Image: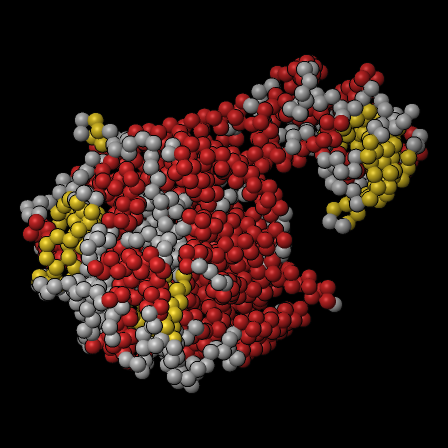
């Protein structure tokens, strides 16, 4: 166990160092995209664990990210590390509350409750307007980057660090007794119960862990954007997270990484393509904005129909064939 | 006489693991053929392959001179091939009457009403519980319903998967007697999958034993079979 | 008292639409164990078709017919082209495919019709009938209630009294047994999707004139309410969808009227939690709900 | 374990490839986005999603205006390239697209970024990168913080100014009526209400109701207003909800005098929302504006803008959003001219701060070293017989307790071709 942990640590440090090295090759915009992808990764990794390993579907992870983001925004800006830790703690508590309800519910019923949780976010920010400042949101004064590093690179480092911690913790959890119990519960609840696994507790725990990851992702969102507002954490975000983990490859941390990368790169890539097309003003007006959405939607449908196991599954098969 | 059902080199399985390994089998019309064998021998897989629920990896099934390859499940019943799956598979959310009517929805002829009435005559208890839901029935009643539902379609070949499972000996005897009677009066052909060897053999014209996905003993006398299968 | 009556009637008129929409979700859930997240987008697409037809013929009713026919066709197409092939890897894949369809359909509508709101006329006046100074319902509200009631009766007859309905119920509860009995389950599922999409299209036709107007995202919020309604009622129960829909409509109206519009999402969450913690499968999750 | 390591490294390597392949160097010296023959500016707009109706026309109109200017030789020999990015009114997308504009496309300035929650999120980023952030499309007061955000400038009169002017109209023209308020449950509604109270007095609002954009059932609120016997309803609403409120009130038999905020009071937009059957309900509606109106066929600005729209965006339906987009373009061209031939980010910020711009707005902009808020006044308009025409005097005021004053100078007239003369 300890040896596995050590290996995970080595891999994590190696991977994170490679990415930090990468930040020196990228221009500031790509660094910001990398930072955003890393922030998404915190959330998608937790979500893929919840869905892929525990079979629970949540449409509420956007709301859990919001709890983390608002925590960072509301705490004094001086000690970023402390506010991020507090954000994870608050999201964990929120996850525990939702998770207790979730342990009793299955499939679409859980989806329904988590959907309602997502819809509550803007309502709460409006009702407690004095604290959350409604639709306009709050600004986040993150400590500035050190002078010797470009701000976008610094942001990328922060997000990479958060993602690395998330992946390290999750990888170790998956190898532990908890990980085995999660999988057992997903495969066959009754059998798991007969084998003496406390099913409800396991499910609550899975929800709590993934909520903590979402909280960290949300906190990073706040730091990167230097602001939080409810429309960032709308239902769309929750759905996109879901899309990312499925298209990336459900249940695998690598798949979560592909999904996170996709969320950032795909809209941008499609926009670049449509930008290059010679279009009349009327056609351009109709296509701008709509064409990327159409391509995104079509991609999703095609991946589901033609690429089971998502991108990671595709990659694994390709590597196998090469050998 | 030409066999009603001819199986040649049938190989099938789930997810690449073969469960049936080149099975050959032939059943004459108006006979009862018992397929015996231990749990996991491949009996249920054989029946599912015959009715088309799983696609065979190799081999062929010829029914009444026609190769069934590519004929979907729902068309096989139209050709006169009825399958009563293991565990009776009564649709619990439907009433007895609905379960029965479900089996004749595809029929366009005028005798549907008469055939339904006949089944209710044949299985007295069902008539009394006509409007009860499937999940309210006892095990015996469910078996009657499943059998009646298969018969009302007017099949020529009946595939019965473990009809005796969980039933009282008296009920089992009644069912088997009925099968024998139908064979003699209407010329019904039956493929009877059973673990309950004694009762199966009491009506079977012929029996085969399956083990590890193959037909190991075909056309054997009572004694050999008993020896091979039960060890006495 | 006057206000209470008003809010109740207002809530019921909206709830009827949620009920119809929830019912469409239930139809598909029972047949395929899929929550059709694309239902709102399909319904909006049908409503755009109606918009075009009404624009060309000048008749609301031809538009309504076109929406229903378009809903049938779209539902069948989605089942044949996408959903039939999407459910093989796991339960989540159809959901993702449906979400992909939402993006695709909304984007296509935006390209064809533009991202503007189009006003949609109602066939009856929306002015409330007043009885001794009380605002009661409008003729249009009555039309909505009547249309939803008619559809429910038709569906009840279809499911309870016809051969097709028997096939659909059997295929939903026991697809394999149904196939063994000669039911062409594939066709039945296609029909189920077609019917559900038509019911969804009707809901869209009824609700869009009362909201901001026709827009690719016009049904997003209705989807959330309709889904909530179906979950509260129990996804396996058509009766549950109807009760859930009316319940959600009335609760939203009371909360909006007495506490303020910003509190309604919180009320929805509390309603869901209360119902589901007492009955994790929804209000009508038990045996008696299994009959249509 | 080796597989995990392997996968990790594969992933890292692949990411390097993907991102590096996508990366494109854009290193050029001098002012970003400016060459001898071009100047590139960018914007974020809701082209898709629920906020897109109406607003998605603005950037098309601005672009059409720039095409018109480019066809006449550009500004100081530079053609204007307008890069419009869709953010779907989602602040997270705004973050991405504005960074793409600034860091990757290297735009000279961000022009007319639309929306309060969306634009609030990029203020700090634009400040850090010293990007001129001109003429934000929203009436929030946040854009007026010269000390904190020295490069950000507003455009719209803020909601408080508007509230004060609408209240002045009520005081003068609708005395002794029961005045109520219906507003969006955020800064928009709050700031407008503050302005109304400033003029009418805190205790004079009989009943207040609010809505959230995610709940389209406004019947409960309007039945409350009806029950309270409101005669005048001041409505701080976006167009969709103005239309919804007017239609819902009508079906409840409630016909108050509507006094609607500028952002939600454009008759063309509202009539399109209400349809042929509902449009007559708008008769008598009072709102306010600060730009030339669609229904003023004789106004030379309207004539010119309509001509430009017909030439460069022929399929665009001409409404208040189009005039708004063209006015933004006109103001930006004025600023470019004032910044001089040697265009830098500092020179344009200085030019905007120096102000002195005239037209197409009928009141002056408030820009100065200590004030970055946009237009400082409005003129009340009224729908009569299906036409929305200005009535009464032009008013100017501030967003605090200053008085509401009449502005008496004549409205500016457009130069030839509606291109400002440098």
Q: Quadrant of the N terminus of chain C?
A: top left
Q: How many marks are shown on the rendered structure?
A: 0
Residue D310, located in which quarter of the rendered image? Answer: bottom left
Residue B166, located in which quarter of the rendered image? Answer: top right
Identify the residue at image location x=10%, y=63%.
D407
The image's colouring method is secondary structure
| Residue in front for this viewpoint, D244 or D197 | D244
Identify the residue at image location x=29%, y=39%.
D276
| Residue in front for this viewpoint, D207 or C115 | C115
Left or right placement of residue D393 versus residue C261 in this view: left
Residue A164 place in picture, x, y as percent:
52, 71
Residue D157, compared with residue B109, is above or below; it is: below
Residue A66 place in picture, x, y as percent:
39, 60
Residue B194 in sight from this viewpoint: no
Left or right placement of residue D159 versus residue D85 in this view: left
Residue D349 place in picture, x, y as percent:
27, 77
| Residue in front for this viewpoint, C84 or A106 | C84
Identify the residue at image location x=33%, y=52%.
D317
| Residue in front for this viewpoint, D328 or D37 | D37
Residue D399, compared with residue C13, is above or below; it is: below
Question: Which residue is most to the bottom?
Answer: A148
Residue C85 in sight from this viewpoint: yes
Residue D304 place in picture, x, y as percent:
26, 60
Identify the residue at image location x=35%, y=40%.
C120
Residue B94, located in which quarter of the rendered image? Answer: top right
């Amino acid at each position: 166990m300890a040896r596995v942990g050590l290996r995970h640590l080595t891999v994590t440090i190696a991977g994170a160092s490679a990415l930090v090295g990468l930040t020196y090759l990228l221009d500031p915009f790509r660094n910001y995209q990398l930072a955003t992808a890393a922030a998404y990764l915190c959330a998608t990794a937790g979500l893929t664990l919840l869905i892929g390993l525990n079979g629970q579907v949540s449409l509420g992870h956007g709301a859990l990210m919001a709890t983390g983001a608002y925590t960072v925004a509301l705490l004094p800006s001086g000690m970023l590390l402390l506010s991020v830790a507090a954000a994870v703690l608050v999201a964990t508590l929120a996850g525990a509350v939702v998770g207790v309800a979730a342990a009793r519910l299955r499939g679409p019923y859980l989806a329904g409750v988590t959907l309602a949780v997502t819809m509550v976010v803007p309502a709460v920010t409006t009702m407690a307007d004095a604290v959350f400042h409604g639709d306009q949101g709050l600004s986040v004064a993150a400590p500035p980057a050190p002078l010797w590093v470009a701000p976008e690179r610094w942001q990328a480092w922060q997000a990479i660090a958060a993602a690395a911690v998330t992946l390290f913790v999750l990888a170790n959890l998956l190898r532990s007794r908890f990980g085995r119990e999660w999988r057992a519960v997903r495969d066959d609840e009754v059998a798991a119960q007969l084998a003496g696994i406390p099913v409800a507790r396991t499910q609550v725990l899975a929800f709590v862990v993934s909520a903590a990851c979402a909280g960290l992702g949300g906190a990073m969102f706040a730091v990167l954007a230097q602001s939080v507002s409810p429309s960032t954490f709308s239902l769309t975000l929750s759905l996109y997270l879901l899309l990312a983990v499925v298209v990336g490859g459900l249940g695998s941390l690598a798949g979560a990484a592909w999904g996170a990368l996709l969320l950032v790169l795909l809209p941008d890539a499609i926009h670049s393509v449509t930008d290059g097309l010679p279009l009349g003003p009327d056609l351009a007006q109709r296509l701008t904005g709509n064409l990327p959405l159409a391509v995104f939607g079509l991609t999703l449908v095609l991946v589901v129909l033609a690429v089971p196991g998502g991108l990671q599954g595709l990659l694994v098969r390709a590597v196998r064939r090469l050998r | 006489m030409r066999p009603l059902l001819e199986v040649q080199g049938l190989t099938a399985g789930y997810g690449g693991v073969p469960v049936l390994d080149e099975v050959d089998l032939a059943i004459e019309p108006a006979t009862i053929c018992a397929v015996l064998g231990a749990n996991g021998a491949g009996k249920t897989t054989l029946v599912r392959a015959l009715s088309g629920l799983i696609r065979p990896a190799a081999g062929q099934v010829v029914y009444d001179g026609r190769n069934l390859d590519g004929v979907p499940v729902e068309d096989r019943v139209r050709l006169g091939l009825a399958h009563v799956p293991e565990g009776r598979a009564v649709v619990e959310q439907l009433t007895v009457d609905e379960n029965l009517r479900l089996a004749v929805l595809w029929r366009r002829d005028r005798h549907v009403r008469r055939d339904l009435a006949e089944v209710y005559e044949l299985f007295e208890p069902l008539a009394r519980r006509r409007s009860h839901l499937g999940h309210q029935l006892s095990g015996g009643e469910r078996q009657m319903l499943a059998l009646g539902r298969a018969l009302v379609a007017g099949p020529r070949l009946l595939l019965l998967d473990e009809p005796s499972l969980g039933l009282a000996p008296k009920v089992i005897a009644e069912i088997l007697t009925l099968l024998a009677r139908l064979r003699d009066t209407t010329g019904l052909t039956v493929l009877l999958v059973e673990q309950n060897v004694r009762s199966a053999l009491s009506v079977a014209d012929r029996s085969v034993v399956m083990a590890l996905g193959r037909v190991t003993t075909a056309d054997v006398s009572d004694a050999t079979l008993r020896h091979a299968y039960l060890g006495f | 008292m006057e206000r209470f009556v008003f809010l109740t009637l207002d809530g019921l008129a909206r709830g009827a639409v949620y009920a119809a929409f929830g019912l469409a979700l239930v139809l598909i859930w029972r047949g395929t164990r899929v929550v059709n997240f694309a239902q709102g987008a399909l319904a909006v697409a049908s409503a755009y078709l109606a918009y075009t037809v009404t624009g060309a013929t000048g008749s609301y009713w031809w538009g309504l017919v076109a929406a229903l026919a378009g809903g049938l066709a779209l539902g069948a197409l989605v089942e044949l082209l996408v959903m039939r092939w999407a459910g093989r890897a796991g339960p989540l894949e159809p959901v993702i495919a449906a979400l992909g369809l939402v993006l695709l359909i909304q984007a296509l509508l935006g390209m064809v019709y533009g991202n503007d709101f189009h006003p949609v006329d109602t066939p009856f006046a929306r002015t409330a009938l007043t009885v001794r100074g009380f605002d009661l319902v409008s003729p249009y509200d009555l039309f909505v209630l009547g249309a939803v009631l008619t559809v429910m009766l038709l569906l009840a007859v279809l499911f309870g009294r016809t051969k097709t309905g028997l096939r659909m119920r059997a295929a939903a509860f026991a697809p394999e047994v149904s196939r063994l009995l000669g039911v062409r389950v594939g066709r039945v599922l296609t029909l189920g999707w077609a019917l559900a999409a038509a019911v969804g299209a009707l809901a869209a036709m009824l609700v869009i004139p009362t909201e901001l107007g026709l827009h690719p995202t016009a049904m997003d919020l209705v989807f959330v309410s309709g889904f909530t309604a179906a979950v509260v009622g129990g996804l396996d129960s058509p009766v549950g969808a109807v009760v859930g829909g009316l319940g959600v409509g009335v609760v939203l109206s009371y909360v909006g009227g007495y506490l303020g519009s910003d509190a309604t999402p919180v009320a929805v969450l509390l309603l869901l939690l209360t119902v589901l913690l007492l009955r994790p499968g929804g209000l009508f999750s038990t045996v008696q709900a299994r009959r249509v | 374990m080796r597989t995990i390591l392997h996968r990790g490294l594969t992933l890292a390597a692949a990411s390097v490839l993907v991102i590096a392949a996508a990366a494109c160097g854009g290193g050029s010296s001098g002012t970003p986005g400016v060459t001898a023959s071009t100047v590139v500016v960018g914007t974020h707009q809701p082209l898709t999603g629920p906020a897109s109706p109406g607003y998605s026309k603005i950037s098309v109109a601005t672009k059409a205006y720039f095409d018109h200017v480019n066809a006449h030789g550009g500004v100081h020999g530079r053609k204007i390239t307008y890069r419009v990015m869709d953010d779907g009114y989602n602040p997270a997308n705004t973050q991405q697209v504005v960074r793409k504009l600034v860091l990757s496309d290297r735009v000279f300035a961000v022009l007319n970024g639309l929306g309060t929650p969306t634009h609030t999120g990029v203020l700090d980023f634009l400040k850090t990168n010293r990007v001129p952030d001109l003429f934000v499309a929203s009436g929030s007061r946040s854009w007026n913080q010269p000390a904190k955000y020295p490069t950000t400038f507003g455009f719209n009169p803020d909601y408080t100014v508007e509230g004060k002017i609408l209240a002045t109209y009520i005081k003068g023209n609708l005395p002794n009526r029961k005045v109520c308020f219906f507003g969006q449950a955020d800064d928009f509604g709050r700031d407008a209400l503050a302005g109304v109270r400033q003029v009418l007095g805190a205790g004079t609002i009989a009943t207040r109701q609010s809505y959230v954009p995610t709940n389209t059932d406004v019947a409960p609120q309007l039945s409350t207003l009806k029950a309270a016997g409101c005669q005048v309803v001041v409505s701080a609403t976006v167009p969709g909800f103005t239309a919804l409120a007017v239609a819902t009130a009508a079906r409840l038999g409630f016909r108050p005098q509507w006094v609607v905020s500028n952002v939600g009071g454009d008759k063309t937009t509202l009539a399109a929302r209400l349809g042929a059957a509902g449009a007559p309900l708008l008769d008598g509606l009072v709102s306010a504006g600060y730009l030339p109106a669609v229904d003023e066929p004789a106004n030379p600005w309207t004539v010119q803008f309509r001509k430009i729209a017909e030439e460069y965006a022929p399929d665009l339906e001409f409404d208040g959003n189009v005039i708004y987009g063209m006015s933004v373009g006109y103001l930006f061209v004025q600023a470019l001219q004032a910044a001089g031939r040697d265009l830098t980010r500092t020179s344009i910020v200085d030019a905007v701060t120096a102000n002195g711009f005239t037209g197409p707005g009928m009141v002056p902009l408030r820009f100065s070293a200590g004030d970055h808020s946009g237009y400082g006044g409005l003129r009340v308009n009224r729908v009569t017989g299906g036409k929305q025409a200005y009535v009464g005097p032009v008013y100017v005021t501030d967003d605090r307790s200053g008085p509401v004053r009449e502005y008496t100078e004549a409205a500016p007239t457009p130069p030839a071709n509606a291109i400002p003369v440098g």
